[in-house]
Amino acid sequence: MAGEIPDLEALERTGTGKGAARQARRAGMVPGIVFGGDTDPTPINLPFNKLLKMLKAGRFKSTLFNMKIEGHDDVRVICRDVQRHVVKDLPTHVDFMRLKRTTKINLFIAVEVVGEDVSPGLKKGGVMTLMRPEVELVVTAGDIPDHITIDVSECEIGDAVTISSVKLPEGAKPTIDRDFVIANISAPSGLRAADDADEGEDTGEETTEVATEGDEE
């Protein structure tokens, strides 16, 4: 089921047009609009500093928000566009789209790992690397999972867990077509260094033998 969706508090903006937008910016706000669904578009204002912080955190356009506007019912929204100042690159206007429960959207879903305590590869000293702590999926707005789960309980050193081995939630699918790696288990660094050294010694011996045979001829 859906995980915790972050709240996004906004103020309903009185008045529309360039004049109202400029007034909002002078007051330290960023004007925006919420559209879609069966409701008329709602002009809003967002605190500039809070919005800028969220934008710098990344993935703003792929995060589902629970928008709270005083006097209105809470609504799930996703950002569809952020207009920026051509010189300062600061946000000047934001567009949000209301979502129905059946709407398909792209979201990054967290990866949960199970089976680490019994994994034979990890018991032998292997190191697990989580290549993708989050995976971008196409999901239904009304049925967003908290996470997806990968199982490493049978993984040996050298094994990898790919997206094709993961049971995805009903109606969800990856945004990437290829079978990408989510996590792998590699040999500990000391063992890898020893293997590399052994390979180097073998190569050196073969080179010496070839050179000796050449001299005899």
Image (tube, grey):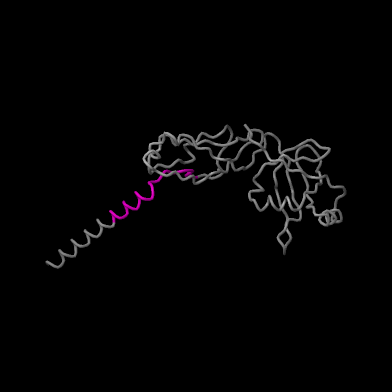
Q: Picture quarter containing residue 140?
A: top right
Seen from the viewer's position, the closer of residues 34 and 63 is 63
Q: Is residue 186 magenta?
A: yes
Q: In the image, what residue occupies the spot 81% across and 41% down?
A: 40
Above or below, 84 relative to 163: below
Left or right of 62? Residue 19 is right
Q: Picture quarter containing residue 21?
A: bottom right
Left or right of 75? Residue 160 is left
Q: Which quadrant does the C terminus fall into?
A: bottom left
Q: Is residue 54 magenta?
A: no
Give the tally of numbered discs: 0
Q: Picture quarter containing residue 134?
A: top right
Seen from the viewer's position, the closer of residues 178 and 186 is 186
Q: In the image, what residue occupies the spot 50% across and 37% down?
A: 113
Above or below, 142 relative to 18: above
Horizontal and vertical percent position of residue 157: 38, 42
Q: In the image, what residue occupies the spot 82% across and 39% down?
A: 70
Q: Which quadrant does the N terminus fall into?
A: top right
Seen from the viewer's position, the closer of residues 39 and 115 is 115
Horizontal and vertical percent position of residue 2: 64, 34
- Residue that sits furthest to the left in the current view: 216
Left or right of 80? Residue 138 is left
Horizontal and vertical percent position of residue 154: 40, 34
Left or right of 79? Residue 161 is left
Which residues make up the magenta segment?
Answer: 178-199
Horizontal and vertical percent position of residue 191: 34, 49
